[in-house]
Image: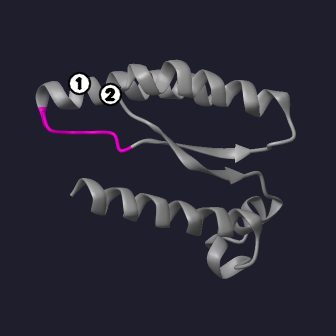
Amino acid sequence: FSLQGIGQLSNTITQVKKYCNNNLQVSGILLTKYNPRTILSKDITTTIKDKIATQLSTKVFKTFIRSSVSIQEAQTQQTNILDYAPNATAQIDYAKFVDEFVKGEKKNG
């Protein structure tokens, strides 16, 4: 369903650019719920890199957010992953993503 959502998001971005903010840019695509052991995750990654990122004129971030039960547990506790499980793999991945994003913004800005 996420791939379908990206298609809908692309349409929304086009409309926003047309009517509200011509300068809107997508910084990149962040893959979440990633499981490096599954063929499905690898296939989806390939599809996103080869097709969707190109269609959106953007990149796929190098950092992936791995699947984690801790994320689901934090949601049920209505708290964030940093407070709930600061050493969870997903929390570590999010910290890496923030570093990647900030470094990219400094380079581009």
With 49 as the anchor, is 108 left or right in this view? left
Q: Along the line of sight, which residue is nearer the eye, 70 or 37? A: 37
Q: Residue at x 48, y 65 (%)?
A: 98
Q: Is residue 26 magenta?
A: yes
What sort of colour scheme is used for the picture? one colour
Kindly report the distance in space between the C-alpha atoms of the residues bearing marks 2 and 1. 5 Å
Q: Residues within 10 Å of mark 1 (few under 14, many from 20)?
A: few
Q: Along the line of sight, which residue is nearer the eye, 33 or 64? A: 64
Q: Give residue 12's mark.
A: 2
- Horizontal and vertical percent for residue 83? 65, 81
Q: Residue at x 82, y 59 (%)?
A: 69
- Which region shows up in magenta? 20-27
In the figure, residue 89 lies in which quadrant?
A: bottom right
Element type at marker 1?
helix
With 80 as the anchor, is 54 left or right in this view? left
Quadrant of the snapshot with the C terminus: bottom left
The residue sitting at the right extreme is 37
Disc 2 residue type (three-letter) = Thr
- Label the magenta part by its dominant secondary structure: loop
Q: Are marks 2 and 1 in contact (CB under 8 Å)?
A: yes
- Horizontal and vertical percent for residue 7? 46, 21
The residue sitting at the front extreme is 107
Above-or-below relation of 80 to 105 = below
Q: Residues within 10 Å of mark 2 (few under 14, many from 20)?
A: few
Element type at marker 2?
helix
In the figure, residue 107 lies in which quadrant?
A: bottom left
Q: From this viewpoint, is residue 63 visible?
A: yes
- Horizontal and vertical percent for residue 59? 44, 36
Disc 1 residue type (three-letter) = Gln
Q: Which residue is mark 1?
A: 15
Q: Residue at x 30, y 30 (%)?
A: 13
